[in-house]
Amino acid sequence: MADLFVLLEAAWRAPSAEEKCLAVDALIPVYLTLCQDQPLAEAMYPAPDCASVGRPARPVCVPPESLPFRKAVDKDGRAALLHAIAHIEFNAINLALDAAWRFQALGPAFVRDWIGVAIEEAYHYRLIAERMAQLGIAYGDLPAHDGLWRIAEQTADAVLARMALVPRLMEARGLDALPPIFRSFQGIGDKATLRVLSIIARDEVRHVALGDAWFRRLCEAQSLPVAETYQRLIVTYDVPRPRPPFNEAARRAAGFEASELTALVGR
């Protein structure tokens, strides 16, 4: 196997979105090898502090509350909404790479799963970036917020919390956001963007499902109750709680149990 963690580090540290996507491409042969249940042949190669991850100078990150509500009612609103999605996808690449590298002790299946997610997130980013270019906007042209990566920093030493709070909380909230986003673009007849969003929606259900499966596996290994542990971690890390409306169908497809969904909806 090629130097897995050398390639992972190169992708993790790549400063621009374009360089990062190209570095993720270089991981595809490694991913295919791991899909054949090959062991990790290398010694542990610790990940550095999250603050040193590769990111471009732009977009400028501001507090979430200072960003305006985005709705695709006109060209500016459509551009702002796509830019926000591009920012999420870029951060999702880093989050998947970071999980594969930082929590490699969980073994080749874990590393394989999150490298696979990084590959798909890079594909999503490219799709959104191409659509943005058609509308005359580029990633970095508008401000964004840093909420996703702050959670990565908070959970750098806790894989159980990382699986709970990134895929199972923040990315699941992304599933909840999809129906109104689809309606916005349907309302203006933007079929090109809807095709891109359909691909992202399909894959994101699988990403949340992976996080859910690993969270459950980790809870089982520690004899922890899933739903109660999830709620406890949300409180412990003081992160935004799930709030309605919920995309119940997507959450069910991603592994959320009926009892947990009932508790969310009835809250």
Image: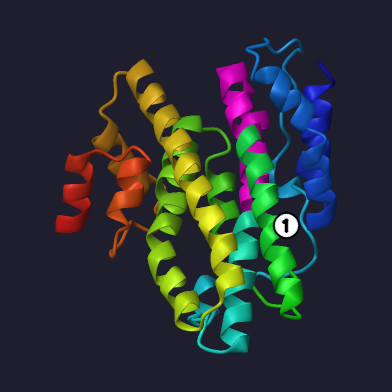
Residue found 62% across the figure and 17% down from its top: 108
Work out whether 105 lies above or below 162: above
Q: Is residue 16 visible?
A: no
Q: Is residue 86 left or right of residue 205?
A: right
Q: Is residue 102 magenta?
A: yes
Residue 144 lies in quadrant: bottom right
The residue carrying pointer 1 sits among few (fewer than 14), some (14 to 19) or many (20 or more) residues within 10 Å by Cα, namely some
Specify start and end residues of the magenta stretch as a single range: 90-115
Choose top left, top right, bottom left or bottom right for residue 195.
bottom right
Quarter of the view holding residue 50: top right
Q: Measuring from the top left, give residue 250's x and y in whole percent.
A: 36, 50
Q: Is residue 11 magenta?
A: no
Q: Residue at position x 42%, y 55% from top?
A: 175
Kindly identify the amino acid type of the residue bearing the numbered disc 1: Arg
- Comparing 60 with 179, the one in front is 179
User: Residue 25 placed where, x, y %?
Assistant: 79, 39
Residue to which mark 1 is pinned = 126
**Which residue does the image show at 45% across and 82% down from the upper left?**
187
The quadrant of the picture occupied by the C terminus is bottom left
Residue 18 position, x and y percent, is 82, 55
Q: Main secondary structure of the magenta part?
A: helix
**Taking 75 as reference, is 207 above or below it?**
above
Q: The residue tagged with tag 1: helix, strand or loop?
A: helix
Quarter of the figure that contains the N terminus: top right
Q: Where is residue 181 shown, x and y percent of the image?
A: 46, 70
